[in-house]
Amino acid sequence: MSLWWARRDQLDLHQVDLIENLPLRQNHLVLGPPGSGKTNVLLRRAQFVRTQGMPSVQVLTFTRPLTEFMKTGCYDGNGREIFPPTLINTVESWCRSLYEEHQTALPKQQGDLVDYKRTLAAGAAGFAARGHLQRYDAIFVDEAQDLLDEEVALLSQWGRNLFFVGDDKQRIYDHPSGLPAVRHHLSPGNEHTLQFHYRVAPELSDVADRILKSTGSGSFTSTGHYAGPKPGRLELHGPFSEDRQLAECVDVVRQQLRVYGDLIEQGDRIGIIVARQRDRDKVHDYFESVPELRGKSKIIRARSGNSDEEYDPSFEDEPIVILTVKGCKGLEFRAVHWLFCEQLDHYHSTEHYYTVVTRAKTRLDIYYETALPQELARACPPSPGPIW
């Protein structure tokens, strides 16, 4: 079961309108802040389109964790399949499948990931003209702000109709936003905005507002309609050694497994976020060394290219998931623990900080060894205590 899946009567009127009443045979872009229901709208729109004589659809995301997370929304509260999970894939895996279908060797991976993704999409640009495969009735893309221009061009070749959702404030890749290229394929009036969000507690929304300014008429906090456990809470832990950070994290997680037990039973998870891939194993080994938590955590790897191939990326029964900053893209957790947060701070953009903070629904714990990165220091009020 997934808590992010929503019944029709749980959606607001604007969300329902975007799902059911937009013209079927046109391209659309839906923008909105974290927790505004963009992914729900995307998947429900794909589900709706399939009932309108357009069953050939493809839903694309950017990371395998997000792909697997979306698949948990393919079933209703009774376990009935409402959307085929096999129709959800990553953009990169879909590009690779085009090479396989057209019996063409993949380009050699050179340069960084962005360069390779650009080469991969550009190399597939001529496949549609061969006429080997039918075009899709519609292609649906989550996190469209991270698309490359070459990927947008490729999508336009394969989808008769395109439906994008995104938010420029949640970009995680180091290249210009993909939204201008997306807008090039829109007719006037086909860009839509979700004004309200429902996931993030106001105490954490305030932190997000201090990191990045809202682009709409109101702040992120003022447009929130949070209905979860109250109050929300932010806790800072440091300056502490890595071992002490792990020990404090374990103590808090123990409590959260009890406090949020009912919500976890319904599908909520606790997210442990680190900057470096190697630290995922360090955290997992530490949690496994605690008898009370043994078998309750799982590493979720955001595979790119050929790395991390042999693992199960699905969200199973483990209530604690461990992943990187980039791997948390598009996900949500009842509580988030950001360990060793100053690591790679020279690499993290304001969008990275904003993205991590807004993964948490109710509680956010941030841990550091030396000093908080300035983006977080400016955004996070100090813990209560004497100032002298």
Image (tube, rainbow, N blue to C red):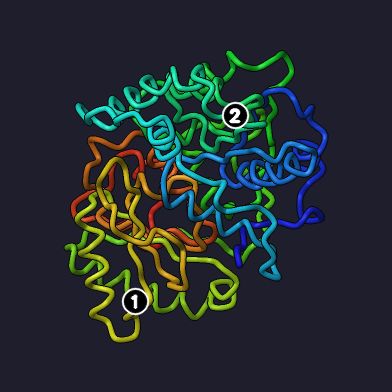
Residue drawn at (34%, 47%), measured in percent from left and top? 325
Identity of the amino acid at label 2?
A: Gln
Residue drawn at (62%, 62%), measured in percent from left and top? 3
Q: Is residue 351 visible?
A: no
User: Picture coordinates of residue 64 (x, y %)?
Assistant: 41, 49
Give the label on residue 134, or none.
2
Nearer-the-camera pick, 76 or 10: 76
- Above or below, comparing residue 154 to residue 99 in the picture: above
Residue drawn at (23%, 80%), measured in percent from left and top? 289
Which label sits in the foreground, 2 or 1? 2
Judge left or right: residue 31 versus residue 10: left
User: Picture coordinates of residue 161 (x, y %)?
Assistant: 66, 26
Q: Residues within 10 Å of mark 1 (few under 14, many from 20)?
A: few
Callout 2 secondary element:
loop
Q: Is residue 161 visible?
A: yes
Q: Residue 23's image quarter?
A: top right
Q: Residues within 10 Å of mark 2 (few under 14, many from 20)?
A: few
Mark 2 or mark 1, which has the lower sequence index?
A: 2
The residue to which callout 1 is attached is: 251
User: Picture coordinates of residue 76 (x, y %)?
Assistant: 69, 63
Residue drawn at (69%, 36%), measured in percent from left and top? 195
Nearer-the-camera pick, 196 or 161: 161
Callout 1 secondary element:
helix
Judge left or right: residue 310 versus residue 149: left
Identity of the amino acid at label 1?
A: Asp
Judge left or right: residue 318 versus residue 40: left
Give the label on residue 233, or none.
none
User: Picture coordinates of residue 136 (x, y %)?
Assistant: 62, 31
